[in-house]
Image (cartoon, helix red, strand yellow):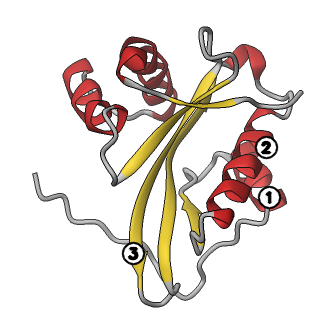
Amino acid sequence: MTAQLHLAGPDDLDRLSTMSAAFHAEEGIALNETHRRTAFEPLLKGAPQGAVYLIGPQRAPVGYLVLGFSWSIVQGGMTAWIDEIFLRPAVRGRGLGRDAISAMARTLSQADVRSLYLDVRPGNTDAAKLYKKLGFQPRDTYVTLVKHLS
């Protein structure tokens, strides 16, 4: 099965919020509806810091992928981060996640994006295996740290 990717827009907010709530529940991320909608809205309106893609048929998506962009001197230019990727449980195991990430990596490479990053929760061995098969490697020389500003 091949994943179709469609750039999401403002009309997709409700379905994205629903899928995102399911993803956050699975991952143990405590965010409320207002937070999710506020985070999605700028990207759906075309903010240059990122993009949201629907996976599957545009009118009945089975998942989504959120990208964030940044600049890196070390990487030599633009980099991208898969902030979230989610597939409905009923369609997992069919290669859609693999195809979506592979297609996005090809598209980003053609746009001269230098690196693609993602996080995987410790213990999520299925996702970690998939990401390794797709060529993602741990950054042995760096540890990601975060300071929440708000």
Mark pair 3, 1: CA separation? 23 Å
Mark pair 2, 3: CA separation? 25 Å
Q: Amino acid at mark 2?
A: Arg
19 lies above or below 133: above
Quickly name the residue at label 2: 98
User: Of helix, strand and loop, which one carries label 2?
Assistant: helix
Q: Look at the image and tell me in which quarter the N terminus lies.
A: top right
Residue 71 circle label? 3
Mark 1 touches mark 2? (CB < 8 Å) = yes
Mark 3 touches mark 1? (CB < 8 Å) = no
Q: Nearer the viewer, residue 86 or 2?
A: 2
User: Of helix, strand and loop, which one carries label 1?
Assistant: loop
The residue that appears at 61% across and 17% down in the rendered structure is 58
Q: Amino acid at mark 1?
A: Leu
The residue that appears at 73% across and 29% down in the rendered structure is 4
The residue that appears at 67% across and 55% down in the rendered structure is 107
